[in-house]
Amino acid sequence: MPASQDVLVVGGGVIGCAIGWRLAQAGLGVTLLERGQCGRECSWAGAGILDAGSFARSDPLAGLRRLSVARWPRFVDELRERSGIDPQFLRCGGLDLITDDNQDAAADREVAAAAGLTTPAGEPLVERLTVEQTLEREPQLRAEIRGALLVRDVSQVRNPRLLEALRVACAHAGVRILEHTPAIELVVEDARVVGVRTPGGRLSGDRIVLAAGSWSSQLSPRLAGLVEVHPVRGQIVLLERLPPLLNQVILCGRRYLVCRADGKVLVGTTDEPDAGFDQRNTLAAVRKLTQFAERCAPMLKDATLVRTWAGLRPGTPDGKPYLGPVPGLDGLIAATGHFRSGLTLTPITADLMVELIARGQTEIDLTPFLPGRPPRADCSQSDRLNRLLD
């Protein structure tokens, strides 16, 4: 076992694995440690929606999401080539259902903000649909809606396949993966983080990347006020209905339906910041999600209930991730707190960490995302109709 590595990545979710892979590609020695199995926590639990978010917003997180979504096709193509595993990235488009006055007004703002933006095929990136146009695209939706916002660059990916591909790509790139190796605490010497303590002993690194999701703030009391991450439980219901009913991702407020080609339908989600680290499903939440599914697409009442699960999304006080050096703890770099934007922000987060660690600077100003920043509640929502997506 080497005494030290160039970089020690703490956390083997989608963010940690992507960072480890990219750093190894840049020629750095990387050890990645994960408390359980890589990718089996929040990253596995999400629905796989990739969404640039609101075009009507200009805050830093909205801009970061748009940049990251643009990098996804190249990211997934390279990952497929390096791993031999197809993450099943699909540009299916999304329908944001309009059901009330607030969403009606928000849809008009989105269309105005996205005016002139087109897909590679020349179609409007964002288009407002009438009820008739919406039902023509998705006949199984209920007719009581006022219409929908068609967003053509919404995509989906199969989380389990993506995470397995990242794990294989990491191994091929030379990343040393240590599963079932929880980081108990940071090792700090003279105000510099030099490693982490694990049940099997100390692991050292010249740089430590904190990508432990909801568990990030637990590694040291010195992170208080600098990296404030808390778990937010989100529950999902998996249904099955053949033949498949829906062609696009269906979004309604903070909930969604994602239909797969195999007839599986993911119904999500809840936001439960008071659940702590409890990952159990509740009858009340499952009932609300199944009722939502039936209201959106009445024919789902005949669907089979396959299973339920919950994930713990890493929330922050202002809804933005922590990206960059942690003040007062030299050698520690945060890449955590992505909440419901973890999958969407994966490519850009990994690229930024490579720039920061290998080159010492980033092309994007990280000031709004730096650890230790004063929280600003007005930055917590950065996408359409007050929604943050898995």
Image (cartoon, rainbow, N blue to C red):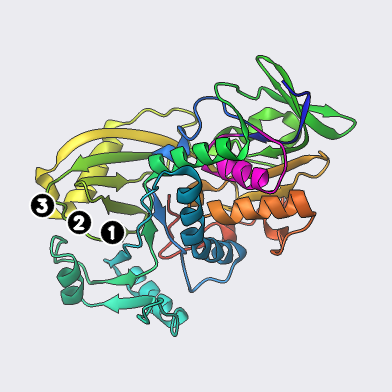
Disc number placed over residue 299 in the picture, else none: 3
**Mark 1 burial class by Cα count in 10 Å: few <14, some 14-19, many 20+:** many
Q: Nearer the viewer, residue 318 or 20?
A: 20
1 and 3 marks in contact (CB < 8 Å): no
Question: Which of pointers 2 and 1 lies earlier in the amino acid sequence?
Answer: 1
Disc 2 is placed on an element classified as helix
Q: Looking at the picture, how far across and down is residue 221, in whole percent? A: 73, 29
3 and 2 marks in contact (CB < 8 Å): no
Q: Is residue 22 magenta?
A: yes
Measured in 3D between alpha carbons, the distance from the residue under mark 3 to the one under mark 2, in whole angstroms, is 9 Å
* Circle 2 residue: 296
- Residue 380 higher or lower than 186, as above or below: below
Measured in 3D between alpha carbons, the distance from the residue under mark 1 to the one under mark 3, in whole angstroms, is 15 Å
Please identify the residue farthest to the right as the structure is shown: 190
Residue at 44%, 85% (x, y): give it. 116
User: Would you say residue 135 is visible in this rendering?
Assistant: yes
Q: For the residues carrying marks 3 and 2, which lies nearer the camera in this image?
A: 3
Q: For the residues carrying marks 2 and 1, which lies nearer the camera in this image?
A: 1
The boundaries of the magenta stretch are: 11-31
Disc number placed over residue 250 in the picture, else none: 1
Q: Amino acid at mark 3?
A: Met
Disc 1 is placed on an element classified as strand
Q: Nearer the viewer, residue 384 or 287?
A: 384
Q: Quadrant of residue 62?
A: bottom right
2 and 1 marks in contact (CB < 8 Å): yes
